[in-house]
Image: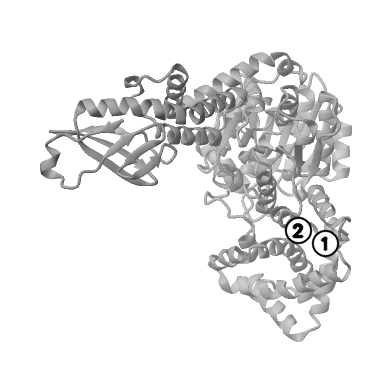
Amino acid sequence: MQLKRYWLSKIFIKNHVSLQVSHQGILLDNTLMNWSEIETFPHIESHFFFCSLNWQANSLQYHFNWLSKKDSLNALNEIVGHWAKIKRTPLIHLANSINVKMSKGYLRKDTFANIQKKSISQLSQWPKDIELFSFNEAIYKSLQFLQLIVSWNEKHLISFQTNYIEKQQSSYQDYFQSIESNPLTNKQQIACITDEQNNLILAGAGTGKTSTMIGRVGYLLKSNQATESDFLLLAFGTQAAEEMKQRINNKLAIQSVKINTFHSLGLNIITSVESKAPNISELAADETSKQNWIQLEFKQLLTQRDFELKVQHYCDTYLNSKKALDSNIAEISKNLSQLIGLYKLGLFDKKQLQQRLSQHHNQKRIKAELELLSPIYQIYQKYLLDNNEIDFEDMIIKAIQYVETNQFKSTWKHILVDEFQDISEPRAKLIKALQKQVSGASLFCVGDDWQAIYRFTGADVNLTTQFSHYFGATQITALDKTFRFNNSINDIASRFIMKNPTQLNKKMLTHSQVNQAKVALYHGDDEGTLNSVLAEINCQATSPQSIYILARYKFNLPNKTRLNQFNAKHENLDIKAVTFHASKGKESDQVIILGLKNGKYGFPSQNTISPLLDSLLPKSDDFEHADERRLFYVALTRAKHQVHLLYDINKPSLFITELLDNNYPIKHNKKHDKSLKEAV
């Protein structure tokens, strides 16, 4: 088809160019632009006296103007036919592939973003007003479908995901009802089905995190979305990993799902690459042995006059110690033992380490502490090298390096992490590297930022509270129903922890409902008051009661002898005593909390740590006593039925003062009801 310009163009355009449309493409003068080279659908632009035909080819814009409207429309109709023949196949293929992908499973955020991007790119090659053109039905429906996809926003995506989840809940209703002794809650089912690239499951105390992890594995297997070899489950302790293995074996009747601690995972990665297992140092496996070894080496260093003077200066200046130098060796050695591992992990990223150290306000003390740490660190590293051994920090560092350099290649499509709030940055880096190796691999992390109490070991709560910032597109599901404690304990514990604005906001519901306050205050943090409380519980017990006596520090707790005496005296009670930290993951019918006094070794603890240790640990919350606040939440939520708080009225805990000043619904012990609040 040959196009002619309007006759008036002779007045304005001296050099007439010709344009011809054919099955090959557009011929402009003597230059042929094949249809495959033309990047946008040619369109008509109307002007006062004439129309122009516009298109883009090879990234250049072309305009053929001074056309009559009739000629322009005829040309466009001609173009439609040729265009449809050339472009229909990729259009229909894309629409069909998107349709299959959207109907196949859970639609992830990044998948949908990619779908929209491809749809926009394809639609740019076609006219916007498709109703004006005579496309065949297949082309027309494909264009309509892509236009619909492009018009979707986040609300549409959420609606689509919700419909899929509800459909799967219906299809696998029998499974979700029977996988555990009690049916999985709606939120647990949603967590099992949701398959975002990164999934954070906020599992509050007693909400069934282990059941959710088992439910997730079973659902993916039952729905044929995974095989047993696709899974890697990670726990932080050997006991937790063994319990997970037993639960999965009992509930799902499978044994080949890979369940590791981070240490055993690191060991497996290194063994796979090096074809032999590394030698793990006894100093790494036994903290007491490590501290004793460091103490011996430290004493040896003290025979050097320069080092002795540095240590003496440090003790005099920063420990305010009037004790002889020898009396401080055990304390310093214990601190150095903790610092060595953190310092080694810090050296993995020297630039970041220098930045963290330089930000602390007490640079003089950091320098003094580094002068004590550096020689002992070098001796420690030489010892490992001479004995061909590694420690757990080496293990994680090596494992990360082997994965990042592809010397180890992961095949795990589903990585599940238990107690994620306890994760450190190096461990997070390892699982991120493993996930990156497998296209489409999903991360399923179960944890609770309200129970993040292990900063002193290197755990970084920010990896939970800022999960998507570190891992990328994330779906957060909060398990909001606890089966452990009642609404009275929940109301106080949740309100207390949420005073810290950096904690993730979630509303907890309780299976057990009561009408009375089940957190009680007692004036008197002494054995007499403790005996009185135990006697009262024993007298009121209609069935055997498990009791946990909890305290911030071990020295606040009754010793083994006294504990045996308590159990012998109160026949209806099974009494155990552990620290707050050791109580994590445990539960009992009732909890008695001791040591609620103000001071350096009170609760919250006001014992400060060294600037070097503070710099090597993850950044703490700006909110005052954030770690201790979470610790109190953990202590409160170990109880199923009732919590008893025993405090020192002469120097009450800051937390007790807060509970009273803010009128928390607490039961005041009858014997002291008159003077409680006034005394505090």
Q: Depth-wise, is mark 2 or mark 1 nearer the camera?
A: 2
The N terminus sits in image quarter: top left
Quick one: SS at disc 2? helix
**Inter-mark Cα distance, 2 to 1:** 10 Å
- Image quadrant assignment for residue 402: bottom right
Quick one: SS at disc 1? loop
Q: Residue at x 51, y 33 (%)?
A: 115
> According to the image, label 2 marks what residue?
398
Q: Is residue 240 visible?
A: no
Pointer 2 with pointer 1, Cβ within 8 A: yes
The C terminus sits in image quarter: top right
Q: Position of residue 224 (x, y in %)?
A: 73, 24
For the residue carrying disc 2, how many other residues have a C-alpha within 10 Å: few (<14), some (14-19), or many (20+)?
some
Q: Is residue 314 left or right of residue 664?
A: right
> Which circle marks residue 179 in the picture?
none
Q: Nearer the viewer, residue 295 or 49?
A: 49
Q: Position of residue 236 (x, y in %)?
A: 76, 44
Q: Position of residue 468 (x, y in %)?
A: 56, 42
Q: Nearer the viewer, residue 666 or 303?
A: 303
Q: Is residue 79 above or below residue 10?
A: above
Q: Residue at x 66, y 71 (%)?
A: 369
Q: Nearer the viewer, residue 87 or 492?
A: 87
For the residue carrying disc 1, how many other residues have a C-alpha within 10 Å: few (<14), some (14-19), or many (20+)?
many
> According to the image, label 1 marks what residue?
390
Q: Is residue 177 above or below residue 154?
A: above
Kind of residue indicated by mark 2: Lys
Q: Position of residue 631 (x, y in %)?
A: 65, 43
Kind of residue indicated by mark 1: Ile
